[in-house]
Image (cartoon, rainbow, N blue to C red):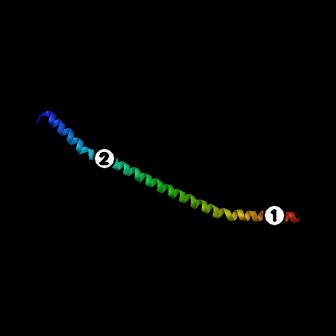
């Protein structure tokens, strides 16, 4: 075998040997990107649910206070009108 054929064989071997590795790298990076997108969507959903729960708790605490304040204000207005 001459040197040119040996170099050609080496180049062909390297090209075919490492081509699947490059294809796998693309697949791995795509899989990682998909996983990160999925995690981001899950975190957004958790955040959305947490905000909803917090708002609900705040409303449950505020509504009775606002109602009580409105009733007191109404009673005070009636008393002032009666005077």
- On the rendered image, what quadrant is the N terminus found in? top left
Check whether the beta carbons of the residues at disc 2 and disc 1 lie within 8 A of each other.
no
Q: Position of residue 12 (x, y in %)?
A: 21, 40
Q: Tell me: 81 left or right of 70.
A: right
Q: Tell me: 47 left or right of 79.
A: left
Q: Is residue 2 above or below residue 45?
A: above
Q: Tell me: 76 left or right of 51.
A: right
Q: Is residue 13 above or below residue 47?
A: above
Q: In this view, does 60 lie above or below 16?
A: below
Q: Which residue is drawn at 27% across and 47% down?
A: 20
Q: Tell me: 15 left or right of 49.
A: left
Q: Position of residue 59 (x, y in %)?
A: 64, 62
Of circles 2 and 1, the one toward us is 2
Within 10 Å of the Cα at label 1, are there few (<14), some (14-19), or many (20+) other Cα atoms?
Answer: few
Q: Residue at x 38, y 51 (%)?
A: 32
Name the residue that disc number 2 marks: 23
What's the CA distance linking mark 2 and mark 1?
Answer: 78 Å
Closer to the N terminus: mark 2 or mark 1? 2
Q: Position of residue 30 (x, y in %)?
A: 37, 49
Q: Is residue 33 above or below residue 8?
A: below
Please tell me whether mark 1 sits on a helix, a strand or a loop: helix
Residue 8: mark in rendering:
none
Please state which of residues 79 and 33 is positioned toward the viewer in this rendering.
33
Q: Which residue is drawn at 82% across and 63% down?
A: 77
Within 10 Å of the Cα at label 2, are there few (<14), some (14-19), or many (20+) other Cα atoms?
Answer: few
Residue 76: mark in rendering:
1
Q: Where is residue 56 in the image (x, y as percent from the top left)?
A: 60, 62
Farthest residue in the left direction?
A: 1
Please tell me whether mark 2 sits on a helix, a strand or a loop: helix
Q: Which residue is drawn at 70% across and 63% down?
A: 65
Q: In which quarter of the image is residue 62?
A: bottom right
Q: Quadrant of residue 57?
A: bottom right
């Amino acid at each position: 075998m001459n040197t040119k054929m040996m170099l050609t064989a080496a180049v062909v071997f390297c090209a075919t040997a490492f081509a699947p590795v490059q294809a796998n790298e693309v697949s791995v990076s795509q899989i990682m990107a998909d996983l990160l997108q999925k995690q981001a969507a899950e975190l957004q959903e958790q955040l959305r649910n947490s905000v909803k729960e917090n708002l609900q708790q705040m409303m449950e605490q505020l509504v009775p206070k606002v109602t009580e304040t409105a009733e007191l204000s109404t009673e005070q207005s009636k008393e002032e009108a009666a005077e």
